[in-house]
Image: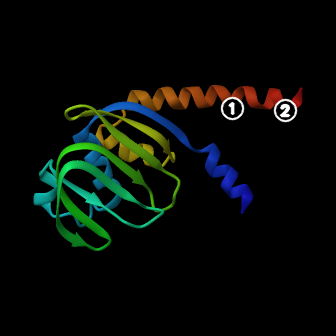
């Protein structure tokens, strides 16, 4: 069990990237409710999913927020002037925060599993180039690790 946990920690990716509110909203939907979100909610940039469970908490901090509808374990809210979003995966491996910098522009910080990178890229939170640079850096670290162990 501990060995598996160590493996997971090794696969964690530190995220620190500027992105739009809409990109992060799409990421949350792709990661949690893409298969059942009503199309009208998906297309409305003011509608966000929230979830009260922990692990798996999703919370939208906004100046004005109204609950629309609960579907499965997600509560959809209409939020205006979003200040921040807290996202954690049900597995507990991904914990990200989006913070408003100016209007609909912000910054995402936190830890993500390598599996989460796919949805982050698809939603436009990070770019393919960002992922490729990360993988190159990781490959370089792995090449030096065996030498450190033999010395």
Image quarter where the N terminus lies is bottom right
Q: Which residue was labeled with disc 1? A: 142
Residue 120 location (% of width, % of height): 37, 42
Using the image, determine if residue 122 lies above or below residue 130.
Answer: below
Q: How is the image coloured?
A: rainbow
x 68%, y 32%: residue: 142
Give the quarter of the image for residue 138: top right
Give the residue furthest to the bottom: 72
x 28%, y 49%: residue: 61
Residue 131 visible within the image: yes
Using the image, determine if residue 52 lies above or below residue 80.
Answer: below
Reading the chain from its start, which is encountered first: label 1 or label 2? 1
Name the element at disc 2. helix
x 70%, y 28%: residue: 143
Please tell me how crowded label 1 is: few (under 14), some (14-19), or many (20+) other residues with Cα within 10 Å.
few
x 30%, y 33%: residue: 106
Q: Viewed as shown, does residue 8 lie left or right of 18?
A: right
Residue 78 location (% of width, % of height): 15, 56
Give the residue furthest to the right: 151
Residue 127 visible within the image: no
Q: Which residue was labeled with disc 2? A: 149
Contact between marks 1 and 2 (CB within 8 A): the answer is no
Q: Which of 67 and 95 is in front in this view?
A: 67
């Amino acid at each position: 069990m501990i060995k598996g946990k160590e493996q997971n920690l090794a696969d964690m990716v530190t995220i620190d990237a500027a992105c739009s509110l809409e990109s992060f909203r799409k990421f949350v939907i792709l990661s949690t409710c893409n298969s059942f979100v009503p199309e009208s909610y998906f297309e409305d940039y003011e509608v966000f999913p929230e979830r009260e469970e922990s692990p798996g908490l999703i919370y939208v901090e906004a100046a004005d927020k109204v609950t629309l509808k609960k579907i499965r374990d997600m509560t959809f809210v209409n939020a205006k002037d979003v200040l921040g979003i807290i996202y954690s995966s049900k597995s507990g491996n991904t914990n990200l925060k989006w913070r408003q910098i100016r209007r609909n522009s912000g910054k995402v910080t936190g830890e993500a599993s390598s599996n989460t990178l796919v949805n982050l890229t698809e939603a436009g939170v990070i770019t393919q180039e960002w992922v490729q640079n990360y993988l190159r850096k990781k490959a370089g670290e792995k090449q030096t690790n065996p030498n450190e162990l033999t010395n």
